[in-house]
Image (cartoon, rainbow, N blue to C red):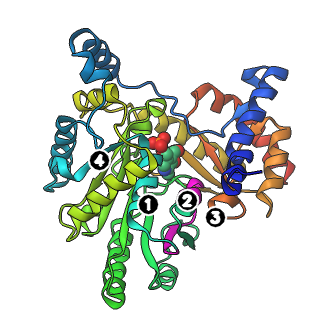
Amino acid sequence: MSVNKTMLGLGSKRSVIREIFEYSKIRANEIGKNNVYDFSLGNPSVAPPKEIEETIKNLLNTANPTLLHGYTSAQGDLSVRKTIAESINTRFKLNLTENNIYMTCGAAASLSICLKALMNEGDECIVFAPFFTEYRVFIENAGGKVVISKPLEPSFQIDIEDFESKITPKTSAIIINSPNNPSGVVYSEETVKRVCEILRKKSLEYGKDIYIIADEPYRELVYGDVFVPYFMNYYENTVVCYSYSKALSLPGERIGYIAVNPQMKENVNVYLAICGAGRSLGYVCAPSLFQQVVKNCIDAKVDVNVYKENRDILLNNLTAYGYECVKPDGAFYLFVKALEEDAYAFCEKAKKHEILVVPCDDFGVKGYVRISYCVDKKRIENSLPAFKALAEEYGK
Ligand code: PLP
């Protein structure tokens, strides 16, 4: 057999999330969709803002077909990049230009490109548990090694001492995801400042640049008055991987961007390496129509109150039934301590109550499960008696 063994392995094995999702479809056929409480996937349940549909219609009726369906520059349409740079500048008091923005097919592509651009074979990339499982795939594909920093419990903020101990002369990047999938935690400004201080100190000590890759698909999904620090405001060597998948409920359209901090000494070379990595991975010319859509809807927002309401119903009721939950300030996931040590065994028991949740061992934290609450409110309300019965089975 001549195919690449690593790729064969990746393609043959579904992620634990996909596995559960596939089971939910089979089970829905057997007992009816409304009787399966599927909380596995992070597919936004809130409709995209009205402006999106209006803008698409408008563009189709008025714009030149080449603009909508033709190739753009490899790094994206210039006027789109300019609009995004100006929007970032207004929001975060920065000084980006179109030459700091690279349009991509969502955060997954952005991460793959940044890792390929910033790492050399054998370099280390630190991730903070719990972390999005695909980081491992992207880092290893870039020839890097995954180094996991453990969280502080029960807050699930970053354990600063552990983080510092994980930095070595081989560390070239760290990935930070806030609001976090799967914990819903937003890293505090104090945590962010400490992380940046340590990176500065270690960069000096090892005589090399260490990059922050800020993975921000959930930046806009925060509840209440929660401040989400923008890493470029705290650390020069930052690249931001942004996506409209969750922010505008457009995951199937595959649109996002990479932003390079212009305050970075090597910003021109980093941007060129990003262009090179995009080229080598085939991530050039992100979907043209959706580049234009995001340009025309630069200030559009989804209604996060729908997610907030779901969060509150789940958090309040599950806590009352005896579950230990991490209060999510953002994203649309509830991180819950399994009622036994083995999260897989707990998920199997939950399945008997038709509750489908994801064990978080692959996210780097044992003994926890993730509940995606980006679902119809009815599903959450209908599932409550099942969650209660499950807790009672454990003597709660
Ligand atoms: N990063 C995190 C933390 C995610 O949760 C996801 C998707 O769920 C991604 C990246 C990938 O996002 P996209 O759909 O924009 O590629």
Q: Is mark 2 within 8 Å of ligand 1?
A: no
The amino acid sitting under disc 4 is Tyr
Q: Residues within 10 Å of mark 3 (few under 14, many from 20)?
A: some
Q: CA distance from mark 2 to mark 3?
A: 19 Å
- Dot 3 or dot 1: first in sequence order is 1
Let me know if residue 128 is in the magenta part. Answer: yes
> Which residue has dot 4 on it?
102
Q: Furthest residue to the bottom?
A: 205
- Viewer can see residue 229: no
Q: Is residue 208 above or below residue 109?
A: below
The amino acid sitting under disc 2 is Asn
How far across and down, in percent of the image, does residue 97 sit? 15, 50
Task: Decide if residue 66 is on the left or right side of residue 282.
Answer: left
Q: CA distance from mark 2 to mark 1?
A: 8 Å
How far across and down, in percent of the image, does residue 125 sit? 49, 70
Residue 116 marker:
1
The amino acid sitting under disc 3 is Gly
Looking at the rendered structure, the secondary structure element under dot 1 is: helix
Residue 141 marker:
2
Q: CA distance from mark 4 to mark 1?
A: 14 Å
Q: Residue at x 48, y 36 (%)?
A: 307
How far across and down, in percent of the image, does residue 8 sit? 71, 50
Looking at the rendered structure, the secondary structure element under dot 2 is: helix
Residue 118: quarter of image = bottom left
